[in-house]
Image (cartoon, rainbow, N blue to C red):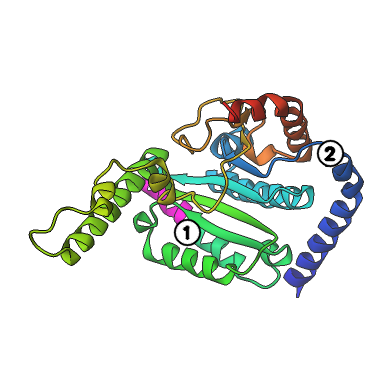
Amino acid sequence: MLKSMDGLAEKLFWSSLLYMLKPLFRILSVGPIPNHVAFILDGNRRYAKKRNMAVSNGYRAGFMAIMSMLKYCYVLGVKYMTIYAFSIDNFKRRPEEVQYLMDLMLEKIEGLLHKESVVNQYGVRVHFVGNLKLLSEPVRVAAEKAMQATANNTNSTLLICVAYSSTDEIVHAVQSSCQEKWNEIQELNANQPQNVEVTKEIQELNQIIQLVDIERHMYMRLAHNPDMLIRTSGETRLSNFLLWQTTNCLLYSPKVLFPEIGLRHLIWAVLHFQRLYPHLEKRKQL
């Protein structure tokens, strides 16, 4: 009963807050709004250390920050939000930390399936991005259920990068493109009568793989390239995240740790994006 009352109070709080912020968001919307915003969640462990709390509490605070950013982005009109939740390199951390993160991920993914969850309240489609075969079976199954359960949500999309690295994504896309091309050639050859001159169709298939072939097999093929990438803690490294997709992306690096990120940081990021928008668009046309 108490938990239910707390959930209702939180829902009313956010409804009231977002209602009051709508005039501010309308003013921001006079300028261009990024269609896709990506986040590198930097600083969860440092946040915990800074406050003399368990590392696990730092990660939980980071999750709350993700939900806040999702709500703000939704009201602002951002259609795609991507978070770098867990990289392939993170598997090298201490086993107990990795296990805790997997358990927390499972808990939060299952929470997304509840009718009263943020994604269902706002009609957000959830899509997990990465080499999902590397995840434990319970986490992978939960991720697949969440994707299936939210597949018909159309208001916005939350992409969660887990067991992800950009180099792994590129290798996967190249390998898949090569396999697809090889299968097509084999199929045409099987249907080609013997001792018949090679057709123009087979000659074209033997040509080098095109850019469009590789991009079709990217993990991130569901979304347009990010317009803006926010990495907290003041870091300006991409850390093997969306290397293929961020050629013309604005990198914004507030010094706050990720659990400390708030509305003001998102507003400053959007204002920075609007100021540089003409230059960014010109770069895309080169």
Q: What numbered label is drawn on residue 240?
A: none
Assess disc 1: are there few (<14), some (14-19) or many (≥20) residues with their C-alpha within 10 Å of its C-alpha: some
Relative image position of residue 199 (x, y in whole percent): 22, 54
Q: Residue at x 70, y 40 (%)?
A: 34
Badge 1 element? helix
Q: Position of residue 74 (x, y in %)?
A: 74, 52
State the image coordinates of residue 22 (x, y, percent, origin top left). 88, 49
Q: In this view, does 16 lie to the left or right of 129?
A: right
Residue matched to label 2: 28
Check the image and report above or below for 145 versus 251: below
Dot 2 falls on a residue whose secondary structure is helix
Q: What stretch is highlighted in magenta?
A: 94-102
Q: In which quarter of the image is the C terminus?
A: top right
**If the image is split into quadrants, where does the N terminus sit?**
bottom right
Tag 1 residue: 103
Q: Can you tell which quarter of the image residue 158 is in?
A: bottom right
